[in-house]
């Protein structure tokens, strides 16, 4: 990973735009870079969250822009004189995207296209888009729309006529982010309710917000057009997380198995075996390079890849956290730490 000094240099005298800037990622990124010698534009459609964040940050180098990535004009206006874009705006909740796939399409696909096009038109130097393990072999609307966001970015990255470098970071469950399973379990425990687990053998990748930010910094520093950066992450069983939280809170509540819900997988995949064929394997991450295919179909019958595909990189075959490791991770979460001390 790059040093703190190198990170500062990346932002020196730059203008940064964060779409979805009032979300978990956006507000954390803002806190990380607010004291650097740069100008920051926080772009989101939630004026209340902006007002709260504005009062909390209180920095003259931060501008708040009310806008929606679905609105091409507002995106283009916000993109003027920008050097770096972090594209975090998305509909991320699996159930809501299942019920309203047209809304997921409008934000995750069409909205993302607006962001990429505006960046190219305004000669933005670098764009880093946030993706998810659910975009790999997707079975739900959220994953499908994020997968098409990725494909859209890669198609634009193949265009050598512009100077904007577009890259992707892809990671699994961010620990204690809004709508994730850990705050749900904690809420059930402190309200003396049974913990509802869908399937005891279900596994999920776990990554902290700080690790997600570090991966974005890495992509910003190292990326070439169309690179996908994937953090090698540990995983844990959902039932294991539930049991560890019960022990942490010394709770006698039970674990109730409710069965897999629509749109859920037993395990998630961060990289397919085919993607890993064109991958730079690093110690802590994968860097998947863009393929150089064209619409000349004749090439498909003349040349292929002689490498033998390995297995997919999944939450089932990655390193599995032990109970002591998982408890330590959970106890480092500020919200849990605060509740345990009460």
Image (spheres, rainbow, N blue to C red):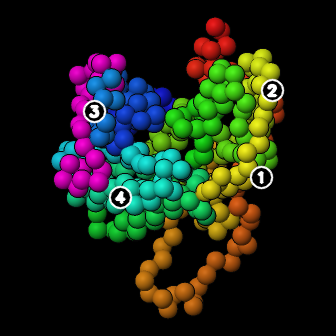
- SS of the residue under disc 4: helix
Checking the image for residue 317, the label placed there is 1
Q: How far apart are marks 2 and 3 (CA)?
A: 41 Å
Closest to the observer, 207 or 154: 207
Counting residues from the N terminus, which is met first, the one under dot 1 or under dot 3? 3
Residue underneath mark 4: 106
Question: Compared with residue 46, is residue 300 higher up or lower down, i.e. above or below?
Answer: below
Using the image as rendered, state which of residue 161 and residue 86 is in the foreground.
86
Which residue range is magenta in the image?
53-75
Q: Which quadrant of the rendered structure holds the C terminus?
A: top right
Q: What is the crowding at mark 3: few (fewer than 14 residues within 10 Å), some, or many (at least 20)?
A: some
Residue at (53, 41) in percent of width and height:
215
The residue that disc 3 covers is 47
Considering only vertical position in the picture, is 125 above or below 161?
A: above
Q: Vertically, is 133 above or below 195?
A: below
Mark 4 or mark 2, earlier in chain: 4
Residue 7 visible in image: no
- Reading the chain from its start, which is encountered first: label 4 or label 3? 3
**Which of marks 4 and 1 precedes in the sequence?**
4
Tell which circle, 1 or 2, labels the residue nearer the N-terminal end: 1
Graded by Cα atoms within 10 Å as few (under 14), some (14 to 19) or many (20 or more), the crowding at tag 1 reads some
Q: Quadrant of residue 40?
A: top left
Verify whether residue 58 appears in magenta: yes
Q: Are marks 1 and 2 in contact (CB under 8 Å)?
A: no
- For image coordinates 30% across by 19% down, the residue present is 55
Residue at the disc numbered 2: 324
Instruction: State which quadrant residue 272 falls in.
Output: bottom right
């Amino acid at each position: 990973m790059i040093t703190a000094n190198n990170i500062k240099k990346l932002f020196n005298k730059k203008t940064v735009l964060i779409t979805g800037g009032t979300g978990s990622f956006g507000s954390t990124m803002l806190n990380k870079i607010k004291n650097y010698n740069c100008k920051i534009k926080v772009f989101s459609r939630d004026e209340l969250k902006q007002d709260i964040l504005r009062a909390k940050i209180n920095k003259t180098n931060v501008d708040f822009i009310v806008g929606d990535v679905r609105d091409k004009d507002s995106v283009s206006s916000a993109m003027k004189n920008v050097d770096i874009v972090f594209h975090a705006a998305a509909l991320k909740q699996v159930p809501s995207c299942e019920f309203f796939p047209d809304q997921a399409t409008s934000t995750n696909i069409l909205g993302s296209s607006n962001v990429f096009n505006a960046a190219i038109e305004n000669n933005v130097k670098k764009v880093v888009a946030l993706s998810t393990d659910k975009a790999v072999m997707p079975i739900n609307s959220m994953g499908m729309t994020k997968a098409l966001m990725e494909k859209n970015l890669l198609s634009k990255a193949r265009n050598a006529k512009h100077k904007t470098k577009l890259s992707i970071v892809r990671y699994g469950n961010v620990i204690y982010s809004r709508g994730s399973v850990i705050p749900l379990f904690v809420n059930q425990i402190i309200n003396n309710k049974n913990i509802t687990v869908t399937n005891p053998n279900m596994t999920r990748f776990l990554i902290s917000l700080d690790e997600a930010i570090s991966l974005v910094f890495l992509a910003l520093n190292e990326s070439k057009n169309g690179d996908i950066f994937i953090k090698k992450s540990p995983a844990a069983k959902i039932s294991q997380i539930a049991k560890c939280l019960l022990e942490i809170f010394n709770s006698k509540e039970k674990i109730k198995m409710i069965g897999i819900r629509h749109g859920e997988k037993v395990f998630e995949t961060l990289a397919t075996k085919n993607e890993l064929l064109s991958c730079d394997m690093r110690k802590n991450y994968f860097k998947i390079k863009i393929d150089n295919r064209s619409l000349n179909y004749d090439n498909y019958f003349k040349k292929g890849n002689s490498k033998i595909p390995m297995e997919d990189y999944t939450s089932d075959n990655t390193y599995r956290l032990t109970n002591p490791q998982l408890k330590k991770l959970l106890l480092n979460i500020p919200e849990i730490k605060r509740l345990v001390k009460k």
